[in-house]
Image (spheres, rainbow, N blue to C red):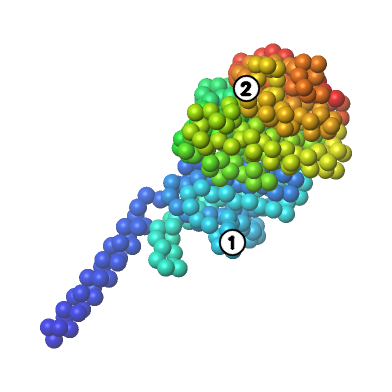
Amino acid sequence: MIADSLHLFLYMKKILLIAALFCGVYSAQAIKIIHGPYLQAVTETEATIMWVTDTKALSWVELAPNDGTNFYHVERPKYYQTYLGKRVYGTVHQIRITGLEPGKTYRYSTSSKEVVGMKGHRVTYGHVATTKVYGKNFNNVFTTLNSKKESSQFIMLNDIHAKQEKIEALLNTFEDGKTDMVFYTGDMVSMVPTEEILFQGFVDASVNRFANRVPFYLVRGNHETRGLFATSFMTYFPSITGKPYFTLQHGDVFYIILDGGEDKPDSCLEYYETADYDTYRKEEAEWLKGVVESEACKSAKYRVVLMHMPPIGGKNMWHGPKHAGECFLPILNKANITVMLSGHTHRYSYNTPETTDAEFPILVNGHNTALKADVDANGINIKVVDMTGAVKHQHSFK
């Protein structure tokens, strides 16, 4: 009798302990989305939606056409991040959606289900953080790129170096309903020692202004190659190639995004024997050869190259831009490039073919101005706009 009572007591104690643990899990602070969502790698047929949670979670995106129906009108398809057949959980959520239609507008919601424990193959889940898809504040809507679009607009910023007042002022060039894409042409931060610097430096400001609705494309600068988190670049800024160099087509423009790597020789003591950018640029050049021979590149009305470090300066050039020019210009000079857009120098300059080894103009944007480009069948018209909104320079390319 005493033994039975003892067994019952121990059993009830175990049940109460499990219940206490269970309540402790679910009474804890709910999971939060701390950064995002923001759009990446948007093309004519795919898009990647990114966000970050404060704890590990299994996440998904639900997608609906922007056809006037209520988001809950029907069951919407769900998309997960997967790897080798398994759904991926973590704090950084990168959901790639394929099979989209060019120039079509979609609505989306994001959901993250907290992972509170794993034992063997069993997973214990907690709270869910999800997007409210109703109400006037819901604006998670994006439009895929469209090579048939008759007119388009993009803006370009660079060399912000995590200065909030600068990015906030320059993003006033963004026009809701008119700007199709944003290019950040490098050195948006000074170094990447942590994940947080990326968001504090420019991603959060982008989300607050546009990035859940309109994509930005980050052209890697030499400062984004530095710091412990630099090797995680593609985790936060994915592309269709899986590399920091890729192409896009929108409207009349075929865009070639190049990665120039670092600015000093690989042997520089500053890199502590970790740099191999000469080899990297040569590999990239082989990829570029195929790009300029593609039908998409050849048939486009305009071809625009974006690279952080401009191959200008003659004998004053540092090794990085010099070697990038040696690798890329012989290929680009045969491709009828309309213009190259760059940053890096922190000073505006317009460089004609007579002054460089390029057979096309190179427009370099400063650190305190933005480029605002309107594109149509008549040409690419670019305004260089300062932090007050004043137009400092204008250029047209046909």
- 365 over 48 or under it: above or below: above
- The residue nearer to you, when weighing 379 against 288, is 288
* Count of numbered circles in the view: 2
Crowdedness near tag 1: few (<14), some (14–19) or many (≥20) residues, C-alpha within 10 Å: few
In the rendered structure, which disc, 1 or 2, sits on the residue that comes first in sequence?
1
Q: Secondary structure at mark 1?
A: loop
- The residue nearer to you, when weighing 64 against 219, is 219
Crowdedness near tag 2: few (<14), some (14–19) or many (≥20) residues, C-alpha within 10 Å: some
- Picture coordinates of residue 8 (x, y %)? 20, 78
Q: What residue is at 82 percent from the left and 24 percent from the top?
A: 359
- Picture coordinates of residue 20 (x, y %)? 28, 62
Q: Which residue is mark 2?
A: 318
Residue 96 visible (yes or no): yes
Q: Which residue is mark 1?
A: 84
Q: What residue is at 16 percent from the left and 79 percent from the top?
A: 6
Quarter of the rendering occupied by the N terminus: bottom left
**Which quadrant holds residue 371?**
top right
> Residue type at mark 2?
Trp
Q: Secondary structure at mark 2?
A: loop
Q: What residue is at 79 percent from the left and 36 percent from the top?
A: 254
- 376 over 42 or under it: above or below: above
- Alpha carbon of mark 1 to alpha carbon of mark 2: how far? 43 Å
Q: What residue is at 74 percent from the left and 22 percent from the top?
A: 362
> Residue type at mark 1?
Leu
Is 97 on the left or on the right of 37, as rendered? right
Quarter of the rendering occupied by the C terminus: top right
- Picture coordinates of residue 233 (x, y %)? 56, 40
Residue 153 visible (yes or no): no
Name the residue furthest front. 267
User: Mark 1 touching mark 2, by CB under 8 A?
Assistant: no
Q: Nearer the viewer, mark 1 or mark 2?
A: 2
- Picture coordinates of residue 154 (x, y %)? 71, 30
